[in-house]
Amino acid sequence: MAKYSNLLKPLDLGFTTLNNRVLMGSMHTGLEEASMWDRLRGTGLSKMAAYFRVRAEGQVGLMVTGGIGPNNAGRVAPGAAKLSSRFDMYPHREVTKAVHEVGSGSKICMQILHSGRYAYHPFAVSASPLQAPIGPFKPKQLSSAEVQQTVEDYATCAALARDAGYDGVEVMGSEGYLINQFIAKHTNKRTDEWGGSYENRIRFPLAIVRRIREKVGKDFIIIFRLSMLDLLDKGSSWEEIVQLAKGLEAEGVSIINTGIGWHEARVPTIATCVPRAGFTWVTAKLKPLVGVPLCTTNRINTPEVAEGAIADGHADMVSMARPFLADPLFVKKAMEDRADEINSCIGCNQACLDHTFQGIRASCLVNPYACHETELVRAPAAEKKRIAVVGAGPAGLAMSTECAERGHDVTMFDEAAEIGGQFNMAKGIPGKEEFHETIRYFNKMLVKTGVKAQLGRRVGVDDLKGFDIVVLATGVVPRKVSFPGSSDPKVMSYLDVLRHKKPVGKRVAIIGAGGIGFDVAEFITHDPSHPPPSVASFTAEWGIDATNTARGGVGGVA
């Protein structure tokens, strides 16, 4: 425990104590919605319950659910989750029971999220009738009476969450959702008591927290997700952020969590190109100005980085979301000094955010078990078999280690001298240095699970005859193109450039603008050594005001 003593130290909130300083941040996974039939059967959130149970077994100090609407207008989409009645509440008891009966001391909060003008339904509402650039519908402006009713809806939602067994709630006040839409000049053009001056614009979030505290009492966690860096030119100024933080503390919040950037902002905030702990400096600036515990966030994916953020005084807690998709046992492995066995989040967003935007259940590129805990169940093999896996790319590595972990005798073959397959090209792309982590993880797991790796060896049919099962995981090869001039020596495939490092000259035409074409462009236009981006170089490149004094925190990118 001494290795990560700050990260694993308990946090006393006065009325309750968190086992450690790790907060599993909110992610909408698609597990939050329950069908009418499932609700009536009492099994509406069984998949969500299993998902959080595994993370509780992994010793997470405090978990936060995906966003739940406080009323119909607040839903993110038609049929999306809300909690506004006892009928909505009952399925959540299965979730809280699953977490608490683990006995690890993990606590769970429910996030209350009103989507405002980001709603994907025609009943969207907001502070003002301004359509979001990423929203399909123009919102209706809430009347003063409707604003007051919405405040009450938040409080009712929090009280129902308490009845459901949650240890607290997180009020989503950042990322450009409804509360943020009231706070910022960017979206609040009102002239009544809920708009105009900053004091009027923050009346809404302060009223929400005040009313929630009145309803739930003093022994219930209230987290407020505060936008500390809007990344919009008409966002909040630093002085306004501090004023709101102090107001929230006075109204009784337990923890202030850091929010970075609106969803419509053009600056990347969680992509793999963002440097690790790239925004902890924002939280650090607020820390000496308030007395309530602060949680920092964004692109923190190893225990070392998380420990450093707390040890350096940037925050009292660290929020990590996607890392718990990649490895639900993240905290447990850190506690047991097994950090080298953590399957790290590489920030690719391909099976989490991409799935969410497509309206399908989230998962994880490096951990397909994520969000499928009730369907994909690990179990010891009924009969031990000799298995050959041909190919040491990500698929072959996953197959080999999974089979070995279940008790099979596994031999893995690849003609390359190192594992990783096409990940070895991906890790060489500027901004994709995190792909090294997956290869690091599998190198460890091959040894731990006893897989016999035969590298630098091309195998044929005769080599595989003695095995009970042969798995082909040989990946793909680029398709051959045929057009006038395609046989010219100047025409190359991406393998020529990325793997074989053939020179391309000064003027280059790339045919194809998909992911590979983009990666090739990044590769040939950057310094060949391309050291990972520093926080300073990243903020400079994207026009972020590193002092956070410019309104919205941007000085050139709106």
Image (tube, rainbow, N blue to C red):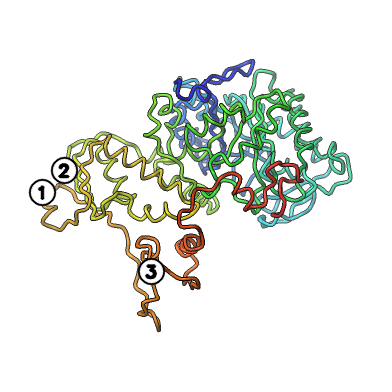
Q: Quadrant of residue 23?
A: top right
Q: Secondary structure at mark 3?
A: loop
Label 3 vs label 1, nearer the camera: 3
Q: Residue at x 17, y 41 (%)?
A: 385
Q: Secondary structure at mark 1?
A: loop
Q: Is residue 447 left or right of residue 518?
A: left
Kindly identify which residue carries mark 1: 466
Q: Residue at x 39, y 44 (%)?
A: 438
Q: Return the mark for residue 386.
A: 2
Query: Spatial distance from mark 3 to mark 2, Cα to Cα?
Result: 37 Å
N-terminal label among 1 and 2: 2
N-terminal label among 3 and 1: 1
Q: Quadrant of residue 174?
A: top right
Residue in the foreground of this view, choosing between 360 and 442: 442
Residue in the foreground of this view, choosing between 29 and 41: 29
Kindly identify which residue carries mark 3: 493
The quadrant of the image that shows the C terminus is: bottom right
Label 3 CA crowd tier, 10 Å (few <14, some 14–19, many 20+)? some
N-terminal label among 3 and 2: 2
Residue 510: x percent and y percent? Answer: 47, 71
The residue under label 2 is which amino acid type?
Arg
User: Pointer 1 and pointer 2: residues touching (CB < 8 Å)?
Assistant: yes
Q: Is residue 345 left or right of residue 257?
A: left
